[in-house]
Image (cartoon, rainbow, N blue to C red):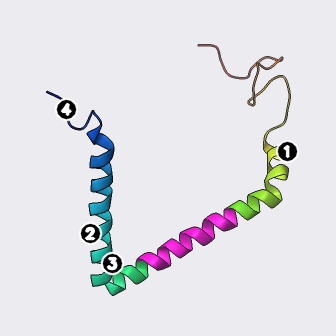
Amino acid sequence: MAVPWLGWEAPGLALRGLAWLGQEFAADWAAQDLRAALFQLLLLWLGLSLLGIHLSWRIHGGRVSRLCCRPGTGGQNGGTPTGASHFPAW
């Protein structure tokens, strides 16, 4: 006997589940005007924040990378330091 969620039925079940979830979300969206407005406001806030982060990183990302990630053979950004460590040996 085949397990329904492991065979060819899995994509169909997943799509039916997503369709049901979308219908429930749409019905709840239509019924709750205040909740929908708050969701839209928070979604807009998230989108603007991500856009601001993206633009800031595009403008200042190279400078931040040069300040924080110095290329070299030792230290915190890769390799082993050439000098003695100030941490005690265990």
In the image shown, does 85 or 37 lie closer to the viewer?
37
Q: Distance from label 4 to label 3 (Cα)? A: 35 Å
Q: Secondary structure at mark 1?
A: helix
Q: Distance from label 3 to label 1 (Cα)? A: 47 Å
Residue visible at 42% across and 75% down? 39
Residue visible at 83% across and 17% down? 82
Residue visible at 79% across and 17% down? 84
- Dot 4: few (<14), some (14–19), or many (≥20) neighbours within 10 Å? few
Q: Find disc 2 in the rendering and name its residue.
A: 24
The C terminus lies in which quarter of the figure? top right
Q: Give the quarter of the image for residue 45.
A: bottom right
Q: Find disc 1 in the rendering and name its residue.
A: 66
Residue 25: % across, % down: 31, 70
Q: Amino acid at mark 2?
A: Glu
Check residue 40 for magenta coloring: yes
- Dot 2: few (<14), some (14–19), or many (≥20) neighbours within 10 Å? few
Q: Are marks 1 and 2 in contact (CB under 8 Å)?
A: no
Region rendered in magenta: 39-53
In the image shown, does 73 or 19 lie closer to the viewer?
19
Q: Amino acid at mark 3?
A: Trp
- Dot 1: few (<14), some (14–19), or many (≥20) neighbours within 10 Å? few
Q: Distance from label 4 to label 2 (Cα)? A: 27 Å
Q: Find disc 3 in the rendering and name its residue.
A: 29
Residue 41: % across, % down: 49, 79
Q: Secondary structure at mark 2?
A: helix
Q: Is residue 66 above or below residue 59?
A: above
Q: Secondary structure at mark 3?
A: helix
Q: Amino acid at mark 4?
A: Val
Q: Earlier in the sequence, mark 1 or mark 4?
A: 4
